[in-house]
Amino acid sequence: MGFRQRLASMVLGSELTASSFGSSQAVSQPDHWLVRMVGGGKTNAGVRVSEYTARHLPVVYACINRIGNPVASFPLNILRPGDNGAEEATDHPMSARLKLRPNDFMSSRALRKTVQGHALLWGNGYLEIERNQAGQAIGLWPLLPDKTEPKKENGDLFFRTNIDGKTFDIDQIDVIHIMDQSQDGYRGLSPIAMARQAIGMGLAMEEFGGKFFANDAKSGGFLMHPGKLSDTAKGNLGAPKDKRTDPGSSLEKQGGLDNAHRVKVLEEGMKWIQTTIPPEDAQFLGSREFQIAEIARIYDVPLILLQSQEKTTSWGSGIEQLRLGFFQQTIAPWIDCWEQELNWKLFTEAERLAGYHVKFNMNALLRGDMAGRSAFYKTMFELGMTLNQILALEDMNGIGDQGDVPFVSNNVQTLERAINPPAPAPAKGLPASDAAIEEEAA
């Protein structure tokens, strides 16, 4: 079934079945479709972790933002060979769409950030390529990562997706697949599944902190009574609200933020004994900072970029050096993944042979260091880079034909010229032989 038929099936509606969440699995598996649907299986910390709930942890949300924003913001163009190097291929039907509106409903930024987020949560981001009758790409549409998976049958690789309960198989050449680590080479590993326990511990500490403040910022304990509780006291402490003799004396009534700082009443000489260690003794804040660092390691995001200044970086003392290291170590591999997938699958074979390719312009977000850029441009200008090429990198207008003239420094020469320098020119007014004699005497 073609792309437009699948789109029509989404509009007409259909039934919800187990196949909507993937292939058959044992219920005991932590990534079973039913477990994913209800919020993921419980971790050792006692909380459920799934790709849906993990983003509730602020550090996970921040890591996805830190990586997704640059990938979504870099200018993206379709290029082809020209007279003076690569030039934008404005004649391709996907040229304007790719950098502005890959489909009728999403901007280029929204599409790239969505799919990059899928890859950072599920380990796989999918885009279906819409093509015209000539086989040229004319649109990109995201596929839900929890309802799409690569399948390998009879030596063929394809992608199976579920849309409103209907299953469709899509040829692998028509699906852009963004992934990082993999066990088999065609299915990415979910970072959330790999780090469920670490994320679960972070979520558990969030929940612990919330309950701690809901309990007047006090830890748990027990009530010691010098004798035996009367029936009235027992009823007030443990009975339902509608059956209490004095609802105002119940522990539940006295707790909570609304009752914070009010006088608490304990009946019949009871004494409060604290049993759990307070959060400061348990190093609650330190543990939370450690979990931030633990999850930052999963995504290769420096702590300083997550507004966490507890640790130092090994990428340099300056923010510019740290930012440059982040782009080289974390962002560049994702950009390489996008470019390789798009260059292989977005174009027809004839277009690839003609040199059509896509390019992310990473210079757009590497402009912070003015001194470094000035030194780079000065050096490149002395090595033959033209003024117009430099102005183009700064998104500035050229200066006409004069800006296309390359200049080379006198101090730069070829190795052959350095080994075999040319003979000096004869002095004016002297024959060549006399000039040589004069030079030898000198």
Image: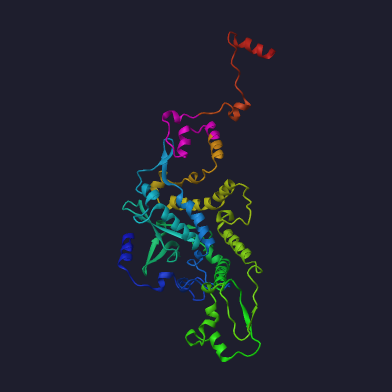
- In this view, the residue farthest toward the top is 429
The stretch drawn in magenta includes residue 395: yes
Placement of 333 over or under 182, stated as above or below: above
The stretch drawn in magenta includes residue 132: no
Q: What residue is rendered at 59% in x and 49% in y?
A: 322
x then y, percent, for residue 111:
41, 55
> Which quadrant of the figure has residue 208?
bottom right
Residue 348 visible, this angle: no
Identify which residue, 355 or 233, lies in the foreground: 233
Give the position of the C terminus as an image quadrant. Answer: top right
Q: What residue is rendered at 36% in x and 68% in y?
A: 164
Identify which residue, 251 or 372, lies in the foreground: 251
In this image, 249 relative to 134: left or right? right
**Which region is colored magenta?**
378-406
Placement of 375 over or under 202, stated as above or below: above
x then y, percent, for residue 80:
41, 42
x then y, percent, for residue 244:
50, 87
